[in-house]
């Protein structure tokens, strides 16, 4: 069990670290992503999923309203998500239009269920992650690519479930000075890039992992983030970000049901005049297969006003594959990418 958890958290935190260093913030919408139990998908031979969304009355104007598909998903025989097409909502309704407003990802797994290759494409760029493992399931290397160019390549050695060595195998011109340090469980302990340094501390408690992340610029504390991860589903249940003077920047609180899907979502950003506070409760409905069939989103205004239904998501699981799926290179404007993308590691 120790080896499995170490491997899971290692992969989770190394990817999180890369994402945070690039984007500077956590993916706040991730807790609202649906989760399907792989055992149920495999047992019932489900091959595809289409998610539809219905808007509420408030979104209907004299010009009408738009409803449609939010996602198209394929599952492999292991019950794992192998393909997903979504809209990135480039100022448009959040529905799939099979054009420049969409992006897709393709995942390849080993027989043991380890992620080997993650491929992501939209009309502007291609990003890839390639992983290798030892015969005990320990991650031995991970490579991050932008298009076909390697950005960062990292290597790791494990002994009896503990990581005993890590090293930067390759960094491009913008990342060659990156420093990564890890604890013996394979979790990121410190990262350094230029004058930016981030330090991590962890505390485990039953089914949760508590993390404190401090970011420094030129040795001066810039921000402090605290977040709690539900180990079973790698879901963030709490996240708080404060500035150097301890002023609150953001706070996120999420509740989940026993199947790993959100039932409540609270986000408060006092200095964000566009978003402010988001407070929702979510009802999840499942069929006999333990698969989602419907989600009702309610906006929580205040106790006196009660709840307001804002949207409905409907889930259609099918034993028939998707009729259409993008292939690598289909969406990118630069057609040269089509012939040179690696299929696996």
Image (spheres, rainbow, N blue to C red):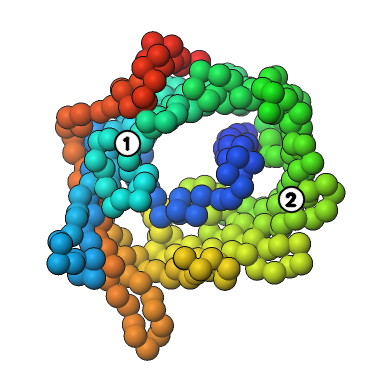
As drawn, which residue projects farthest toward the front? 63
Residue that appears at 51% across and 68% down: 273
Q: Nearer the viewer, residue 299 or 285?
A: 299
First along the sequence among labels 2 and 1: 1
Q: Nearer the viewer, residue 273 or 241?
A: 273
- Mark 2: secondary structure: strand
- Mark 1: secondary structure: loop
Residue on which disc 1 sits: 100
Q: In this view, does 241 lie above or below 181?
A: below
Residue on which disc 2 sits: 215
Q: In which quarter of the image is the N terminus?
A: top right
Q: Is residue 308 above or below residue 9?
A: below
Where residue 103 appears, as percent x and y from the top left, is 36, 36
As drawn, which residue projects farthest toward the top? 339
Residue that appears at 39% across and 50% down: 33
Where residue 178 appears, as percent x and y from the top left, is 74, 31
As drawn, which residue projects farthest toward the right? 219
Q: In this view, does 149 lie above or below 96?
A: above
Q: Nearer the viewer, mark 2 or mark 1?
A: 1
Could one spot residue 345 in this view of the protein?
Answer: yes
Question: From the viewer's perspective, is 175 left or right of 228?
Answer: right
Number of other residues with Cα within 10 Å of mark 1, as a class: few under 14, some 14 to 19, many 20 or more? some
């Amino acid at each position: 069990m120790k080896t499995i958890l170490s491997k899971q958290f290692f992969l989770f935190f190394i990817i999180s670290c890369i994402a945070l260093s690039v984007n500077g913030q956590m993916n706040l919408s991730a807790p609202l992503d649906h989760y399907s139990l792989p055992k149920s998908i495999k047992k019932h031979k489900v091959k595809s999923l289409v998610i539809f969304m219905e808007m509420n009355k408030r979104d209907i104007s004299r010009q009408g309203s738009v409803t449609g598909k939010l996602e198209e998903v394929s599952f492999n025989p292991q019950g794992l998500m192998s393909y997903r097409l979504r809209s990135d909502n480039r100022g448009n309704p959040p529905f799939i239009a099979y054009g420049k407003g969409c992006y897709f990802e393709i995942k390849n797994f080993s027989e043991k269920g380890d992620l080997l290759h993650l491929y992501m494409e939209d009309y502007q760029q291609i990003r890839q992650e390639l992983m290798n493992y030892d015969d005990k399931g320990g991650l031995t290397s991970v490579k991050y690519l932008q298009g076909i160019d390697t950005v960062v390549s990292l290597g790791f050695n494990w002994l009896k479930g503990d990581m005993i060595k890590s090293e930067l195998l390759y960094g491009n011109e913008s990342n060659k000075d990156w420093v990564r340090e890890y604890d013996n469980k394979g979790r990121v302990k410190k990262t350094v890039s230029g004058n930016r340094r981030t330090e991590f501390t962890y505390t485990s408690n039953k089914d949760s992992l508590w993390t404190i992340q401090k970011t420094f610029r030129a040795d001066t504390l810039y921000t402090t983030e605290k977040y709690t991860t539900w180990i079973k589903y790698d879901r963030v249940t709490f996240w708080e970000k404060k500035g150097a003077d301890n002023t609150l920047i953001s706070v996120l609180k999420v509740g989940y049901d026993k199947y790993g899907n959100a039932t409540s979502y609270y986000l408060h950003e006092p200095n964000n005049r566009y978003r402010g506070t988001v407070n929702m409760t979510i009802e999840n409905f499942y069929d006999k297969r333990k698969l989602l069939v419907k989600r009702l989103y309610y906006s929580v205004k205040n106790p006196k006003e009660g709840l307001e239904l804002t949207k409905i998501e409907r889930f259609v699981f099918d034993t028939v594959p998707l009729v259409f799926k993008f292939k690598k290179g289909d969406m990118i404007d630069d057609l040269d990418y089509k012939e040179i993308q690696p299929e696996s590691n």
